[in-house]
Amino acid sequence: MSKNTKNSENNDFNIALYTKYRPQKFSDVLGQEQVTTVLQNSLKLGNISHAYLFSGTRGTGKTSVARILANEIGTLDSDLYEIDAASNNGVEEIRRLTESVLTLPFESKYKVYILDEVHMLSKSAFNALLKTLEEPPKHVVFVLATTEPEKLPETVISRCEHYNFKSPNTNVLKKMIIKTAKSEGYDLDNDAAELLAILGDGSFRDAHTSLQKLIRASDDKKISAEEVERVVGAPKSALINDVVCSILKKESILGLKSISFAKERNIDSKIFLKLLIDKMRIALILKVSKEDKDLYIDTVSEDDLKFLTQLVSENTQNINSKIILNLLEVYEKSINSPLPFLPLEIFIADLS
């Protein structure tokens, strides 16, 4: 093997998976059909807006779709400008931008400006941008991307064609993870894919990042759920099951012991609660709709499904939507708590 070939492989290995597998065309984009279908139809009809607003949580594909849109209208790299509004949020930066839009494109019909995290612009910067959004040159297309559209002035929103990006569900993330792992030459078992999908928390980028950790740590091209638990720091399924059992049987001691075990092993409280809430969600659905497995089978292993089915059948009266809502509140409180597991410990202690 030549030295250049080795360097090429090393460089490829170091590329972030979310960059390597970034969608290149609309058909590559997963879980955002409500956006891509409309955009494709509009472009076929020659309807190109002067300003688009893409909103949605992190890692849902806003910037990727913005780049695809630019490519579809024939904008080459020399006429594509990506600006991080978080670090270029002052009025002077935006004034320079509004001056640059007046110049014609180098090689393309359109110049495209992608402003990421646009909600970070200052009030004066928004005012400077507004005039250009009201009367843009015909050769300019703006794509504003944000995770917090509520922070944008209504005057800006009203001048854009607004598209909302959904967080991908666990099943979509699972399919993406399995496909990516296979492309990288790794065999990912079903339980491992499910766990990674849950930990992805509705973000393609986060799911890719977790998978990359596993790939870097794996020495046999096979990734199991146990390996995910070890590398990512997720609790074992049995530990979460003990807490679910304590909630449905109202046995506080079992739950508190399980939480203590998790703390001793430095398990991430956020991951712990995500997995707990997901299993409690499945328990609730099992109670309401035992026949329709499609409602829950995408995020639970066969063993866990058997466990939850038996547990719910024996404790039907103790599972309801209020418990899930209380756990969601626990999750929110744990994020800002100096003792992250404390809100869950209080919730479990109050069960008795």
Image (cartoon, rainbow, N blue to C red):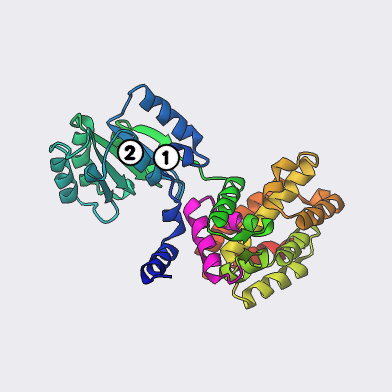
Determine the residue located farthest toward the right in the rendered image.
314
Q: Please give the residue where the numbered disc 1 appears in the rendered image.
A: 25
* Image position, residue 39 (x, y; %): 40, 30
* Residue type of the residue flagged with mark 1: Lys
Q: Residue 339 falls in which quadrant of the image?
A: bottom right
Main secondary structure along the magenta-highlighted residues: helix
Where does the image place residue 177, in percent across and percent down from the top left? 56, 53
Looking at the picture, which amino acid does disc 2 mark?
A: Asn
Of marks 1 and 2, which one's residue comes earlier in the chain? 1
Q: Is residue 88 above or below residue 137?
A: below
| Residue 256 appears in the figure | yes
**Which of the two residues, 170 or 338, is positioned nearer the viewer here?**
170
Q: Quadrant of the N terminus?
A: bottom left
Q: Residue at x 35, y 44 (%)?
A: 145
Is-magenta flag for residue 198? yes
Whether residue 186 is situated above or below residue 91 in the rendered picture: below
Tell me, yes or no, whether the two marked residues, 1 and 2, touch with CB atoms within 8 Å. yes
Residue beneath disc 2: 71
Q: Which SS class for mark 2?
A: helix
Callout 1: helix, strand or loop?
loop
Q: Is residue 204 above or below residue 14?
A: above
Q: Residue 52 sits in which quadrant?
A: top left
What residue do we see at 37% from left, 46% from top? 63
Q: Residues within 10 Å of mark 1 (few under 14, many from 20)?
A: some
* Left/right of residue 179 with respect to residue 285 in the rendered view: left
Magenta-tinted stretch: 196-220
Number of dots carrying numbers: 2
- Mark 1 → mark 2, Cα distance in angstroms: 9 Å
**Left or right of residue 28, residue 159 in this image:** left
